[in-house]
Image (cartoon, rainbow, N blue to C red):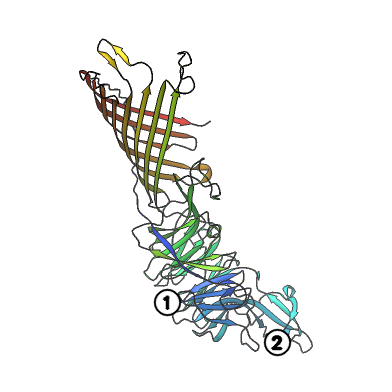
Amino acid sequence: MFNLKNLTFCLLFLVPVYVTAAQEYKFVGEFGEKGEGEAQFAKTLSMAFGPDGAVYVTDTDNFRIQKFNEIGRFVFDIQMEKGSEFRFINPTVIAVGMDSSIYVMDWMFVPILNLDLQTTSGPKIFNYGPCIHKFDAHGVFVASYPIQDLSQRIKALETAAPGLDADGNYALIIPQGDTKRKFLLAIDAHDNLYVCDSEVPNKIIVKLDANGKRIAQYPLAQPGAGHVMHPADMTVDKVGNLYIVDEKGHRVLKYSANGKFLNAFGKYGDAAGEFIAPFRITALTDGTLLVADTAKYLKDFVSTLPRRLDDPIRRFGDDAKLFRYRLRRIQRFTTEGVYTQKLLIPFRREVATEVALQLKGIDGSGNLYYLNPAKLRFRKYAPTTSLISSMFQTELKLRYTRDLHDVEIDNQDDLDADLYTKSDFDEQIIRDAAHVNLIFSYDFNEAYRVALSNRLTYVRMTDTSYYRARDFEDFRGSFNQDDKATENSWDDRVQIDFTWIRDHRLYNYREARAFAYFSLIRLDFINDALDPFNLRFFDFNADLSDWGAGLHYDLSRTFRLNFEITHFFGKNRYTYIDETNVLYATGFQEGRLTRAVLFINGIF
């Protein structure tokens, strides 16, 4: 009996990690395609949503608006016809009122009424400026509302460009600012319209009522707000507060219904409550805000399944398959800017069309509408409350093998007559092995993963030996030494792993991983003589166990701290009976070994 102990102590400081499961989105349907017909689109698209969940799409290049129901079925469209009261020039962003009235940003020509500039022989002069076209719930044109008073000459005549009026006559057109600039449009519960014009000095908000009457105008740059670099989207909550996404400032700004700056939230980063170039915001019917940014995360699940020769999916090592998800996120905030939840959308990287999807809209219930830019198909994703995440991976691998070995030895020096015909020693080995590997892996969110695995192996081996040499002889007598050895072994290992990705950036990737395992090994070995007059018998069995735990922690991009502790313990018994059935030897062994180690790996 022996007892061995070897222990090294270490001290490790850990930072507590709080894990919160993120809600996910699931794909529920799609609609649309390339073309000019019903439910078909061209390249430049804008999206809005009605109070009943209907979807409205402005198709700039096809000069029309289409309405779909909540499942993507075409309802009607709005487009110019001969004799139309309105004219689509460059329709872009769209908004829908509580009564399902439709408002779309565009440009319009307005003749200047200052008569001293108009002569009977001279060309007509037009202001060319941004406007809002209004249509009722059935798509019937109501009116066009200019954002500013275009009835008077606003700029010097020298800025005018030659053109043609509606009758085809020569005219002078005075554009009001950059005609290619982008606007933002939002609507509140009282059908007041908010237009963000970011190209004018100070980047202004113009507020109009449902009939196009200007109510207010105010700048985005106010005391406390600082410089607003790039407004990308805006929304209005139930009480009329306006929220502007500053894409390059990585934040959201909040203004009151009368235009006073209230507060801002967010900063650069991919942690909770932070943004990387936010570009979409929506006030939901439940009173919260959803904000989308460009942060992306990769989650890999390395399979233990053998690879196929014709499998196009990227490999991880020589014998493993890699399943990869690219995650995008939506963050939920209160109207005060307090972060409350993260919602993840998993896309499979091996499906190229999912990688390129572009988020075009978020409706009042939190549904997401992604556009496939290659096929111009919208894909709808709805928030799910299922207990089983789509990033829940399971894998079961079963394997059975049988090995047969036949060993023959013919002694060439014994001068027997059976040279090359009968062997002096013959050994037959049969080995059967069964392997079961079961893995459960669950991603709580883009940063945290837990995995549970169970690896079970059973091996049975028989080794039968035949001797043609003279029977073994000693003081006890002469015995035939042909024998058969049988070995059965069980090896069962259960392991749990926890991984925390601390930094997803490609060139600054850092993670921490902790693991713990426990294994049991059972071994039974019997050797028995085949001849009935040889009573030799050997029996050996062992029960072995070990457990271990450890972690690795990336201190930086190039240094990793590792800590491991293992503990092995076990015992075995054996009994040996000689050829005459006399107990020759018996024994018992027990051992324990504990090992702890702390080290740092570095790459220079």
Which element type, helix, strand or loop, lies under badge 1?
Answer: loop
Residue 601's disc number: none
Neighbour tally class for label 2: few under 14, some 14-19, many 20 plus, Cα within 10 Å: few
| Of callouts 2 and 1, the N-terminal one | 2
Residue type at mark 2 is Leu
Position of residue 430 in the picture relative to residue 539 (left or right)? right
Residue 407 image point, x, y percent: 44, 26
Residue that label 1 marks: 189
Give the distance between the C-alpha atoms of the residues marked 2 and 1, in whole angstroms: 41 Å
**Does residue 71 lie above or below 16 as drawn?**
below
Residue 296 image point, x, y percent: 49, 53
Residue 346 image point, x, y percent: 46, 57
Residue that label 2 marks: 115
228 or 57: nearer the eye? 57
Instruction: Please indicate, yes or no, whether residue 13 appears anywhere in the rendered image.
Output: no
233 or 442: nearer the eye? 442
Residue 314 image point, x, y percent: 54, 47
Looking at the rendered image, the disc whose residue lies closer to the viewer, 2 or 1, is 1
Residue type at mark 1 is Ala
Instruction: Please indicate, yes or no, whether residue 325 appears anywhere in the rendered image.
Output: yes
**Does residue 306 lie above or below 362 as drawn?**
above
Residue at the left extreme of this rendering: 582
Neighbour tally class for label 1: few under 14, some 14-19, many 20 plus, Cα within 10 Å: some
